[in-house]
Image (cartoon, helix red, strand yellow):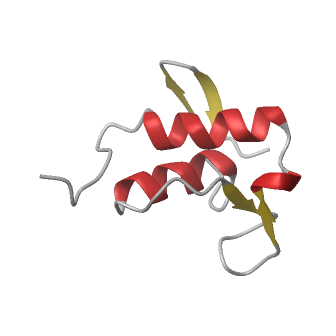
Amino acid sequence: MSAYITKDWTGTYDERHGGPFDRGRADSYYGRRRDPHFYVKDTYDSPRVEEKDMTAEELKAYNAGYEGTEFNSKYSA
């Protein structure tokens, strides 16, 4: 587990690049629709894990990243 964690309104999550929290935060930031997923290691350089294969904890982390970011979408009005 990465040493980088963040505390938000729903808990503490690993901020590892490519992890569920990171992917949720990135989807929100770039104004993309909710699409729970993560990468086994680095984003785009490792296998992608789809929502159907995610655990409840992984989904919770993705959703926290998506909903709990300080910026939500940089593209929103």
Q: Which sits in the foreground, 45 or 74? A: 74
- Which residue is depicted at the point 68% across and 33% down? 60
Q: Which sits in the foreground, 75 or 40? A: 75
Q: Could you tell whether 57 is left or right of 24 in the image?
A: right
Q: Could you tell whether 16 is left or right of 40 in the image?
A: left
Q: Quadrant of residue 31?
A: bottom left
Q: Quadrant of residue 61?
A: top right
Q: Can you give x and y, in whole percent of width and height, for residue 6 in the image?
A: 54, 32
Q: Measured along the vertical axis of the image, is residue 3 above or below residue 9?
A: below
Q: Which sits in the foreground, 68 or 35? A: 35
Q: Can you give x and y, in whole percent of width and height, for residue 59 in the image?
A: 71, 40
The residue positioned farthest toward the bottom in the image shown: 45
- Which residue is depicted at the point 80% across and 44% down? 1
Q: Can you give x and y, in whole percent of width and height, for residue 66 in the image?
A: 48, 43
In the rendered image, is residue 42 in sight? yes
- Which residue is depicted at the point 48% across and 18% down? 9
Q: Quadrant of residue 18?
A: bottom right
